[in-house]
């Protein structure tokens, strides 16, 4: 595949950083975006182009897009990887915080996608890869707002795929399972802040113990398993609509799809005891 101009959001750590390194090694022109630009200096050293971007700040998103457009004419491949998990009992989380979860996980990437589409349509080539989660197909207690964003992203992506395919643009979802990233660390402190001392406190504290056990370093799949899927989606002449990899993803999605809600509910709650 000829070298392409690629933008990866959320590239200061985890999946985004791993993908940036691999794609730069493959000879692509890689731009990386994240709030913590200092965490991407190592990417600059290997030829990537780090940009300081808060995906919820339209001015920063617009400025980053203009920089890439001026330097390379546009973005050929967009990897919408930025996101985070807001956890806590639905009753306990302020609606303002829930809106911000949607701003990061859905509306921010939607704005960026709108910016890149004209160039892709003009050249009749493009790849848009949206980082969902097994959480886009399944659910857990204390994850109502996070799962809501990922379920929304799944439907949004399906609609977008149909709209842009006539222009030579392919849109894919990636649904990771438990991956060794900062996800668990970012998740546990807020969940205790929201629900640790409420009516859901006892369950929340037990939930945190389970999360810390399952997301401790080395307990999940390495980010490289997701990078492999990103590379496949970029290289494929006709990419798959969905790619799945990572610990727990396939079995949990199988149970949810084929065994029904009640059995799935019992299995999930048993895992959290």
Image: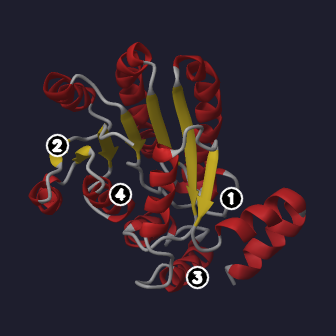
Residue at coordinates 69% horizontally, 84% vertically from top-left? 273
Q: Nearer the viewer, mark 1 or mark 3?
A: 1
Q: Which residue is mark 1?
A: 139
- Work out whether mark 4 precedes mark 3 in sequence or the reverse, and give the earlier one: 4
Give the CA distance from mark 2 to mark 3.
Answer: 39 Å
> Mark 1 or mark 3: which comes first in sequence?
1
Determine which of the numbered discs, if any, sits on residue 51 in the image: 2
| Residue 37 image point, x, y percent | 15, 52
- The total number of labels drawn is 4
Q: Helix or strand or loop: what does disc 4 sit on?
A: helix
Q: Earlier in the sequence, mark 1 or mark 2?
A: 2
Q: Which mark is residue 19?
A: 4
Disc 1 crowd rating (10 Å Cα; few below 14, some 14-19, many 20+) is many
Q: Position of residue 61 (x, y in %)?
A: 25, 31
Q: Work out whether residue 133 can be spotted.
A: yes
| Secondary structure of residue under mark 2 | strand
Q: Residues within 10 Å of mark 4 (few under 14, many from 20)?
A: many
Is 60 on the left-hand or right-hand side of 56?
left
* Nearer-N-terminus badge (2/3): 2
Quarter location, residue 260:
bottom right
**Circle 1/circle 3 CB separation < 8 Å:** no
Q: In front: mark 2 or mark 3?
A: 2
Alpha carbons under labels 1 and 4: distance apart: 26 Å
**Left or right of 134 on screen, residue 98:** left
């Amino acid at each position: 595949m000829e070298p392409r101009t690629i933008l990866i959001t959320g590239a200061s750590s985890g999946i985004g950083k791993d993908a940036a390194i691999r794609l730069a090694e493959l000879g692509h022109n890689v731009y990386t975006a994240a709030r913590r630009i200092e965490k991407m200096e190592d990417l600059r050293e290997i030829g990537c182009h780090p940009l300081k971007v808060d995906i919820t700040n339209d001015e920063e998103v617009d400025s980053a897009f203009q920089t890439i457009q001026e330097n390379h004419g546009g973005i050929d491949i967009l990897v919408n990887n930025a996101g985070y998990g807001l956890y806590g009992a639905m009753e306990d989380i302020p609606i303002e915080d829930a809106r911000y979860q949607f701003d990061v996980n859905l509306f921010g990437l939607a704005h960026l996608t709108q910016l890149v589409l004209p160039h892709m349509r003009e050249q009749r080539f493009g790849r848009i890869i949206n980082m969902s989660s097994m959480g886009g197909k399944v659910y857990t207690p204390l994850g109502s707002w996070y799962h809501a964003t990922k379920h929304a992203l799944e439907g949004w992506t399906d609609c977008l795929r149909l709209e842009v395919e006539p222009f030579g643009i392919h849109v894919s979802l990636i649904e990771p399972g438990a991956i060794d990233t900062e996800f668990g660390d970012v998740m546990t402190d807020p969940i205790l802040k929201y629900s640790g001392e409420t009516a859901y406190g006892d369950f929340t504290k037990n939930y945190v113990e389970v999360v810390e056990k399952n997301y401790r370093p080395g307990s999940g799949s390495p980010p490289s398993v997701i990078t492999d899927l990103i590379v496949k989606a970029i290289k494929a002449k006709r990419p798959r609509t969905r790619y799945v990899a990572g610990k727990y993803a396939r079995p949990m999605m199988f149970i949810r799809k084929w065994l029904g809600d009640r059995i799935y509910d019992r299995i999930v709650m048993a895992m959290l005891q």
